[in-house]
Image: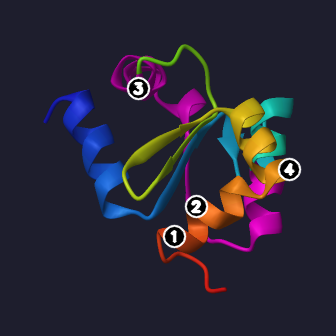
Amino acid sequence: MTINQQIDELIKKNDIVLFMKGNKNFPQCGFSGRAIQILKTCGVSFIDINVLEDPEIREGIKQYSNWPTVPQLYIKGEFIGGSDIMYEMFQSGELLQLLKDKNIINN
């Protein structure tokens, strides 16, 4: 299985996937930490993938999304963006609305 296939499988099998530096209990950069806080505030469960543990995934996710940085958030297979985009969407209410529209959270 290629790295692209592995990433694709992770994204398709899980409603919310965050590729990040560190993990949800111990983020290893400020941007990853902010992404975790946003998702926790939304009250959703998610899969965290530590790109620091696997150089293939670290480079592969950048090619997969054509996005140069991590963290990277995927919701129901759709690439959302990094922590800046997540923050803007959270502030505007757009992120919560997306989670409702995708039937991840109620009301």
Identity, as a three-letter code, of the amino acid under mark 4: Gln
Separation of marks 4 and 3 at Cα, in angstroms = 24 Å
x and y, in percent, of residue 83 in the image: 73, 35
x and y, in percent, of residue 52 in the image: 59, 28
Residue 47 as seen in the image, left or right of residue 95: left
CB under 8 Å between discs 3 and 1: no
Is residue 96 inside the magenta stretch?
A: no
Seen at 48% across and 23% down, the residue is: 58
Judging by the rendered image, the residue that carries numbered circle 1 is 101
Mark 2 secondary-structure assignment: helix
State which quadrant residue 86 falls in: top right
Residue 12's label in the rendered image is none
- Disc 3 or 1, which lies upstream in sequence? 3
Q: Mark 1: give few (<14), some (14-19) or many (20+) Cα within 10 Å.
A: few
Residue 91's label in the rendered image is 4
Seen at 61% across and 86% down, the residue is: 106
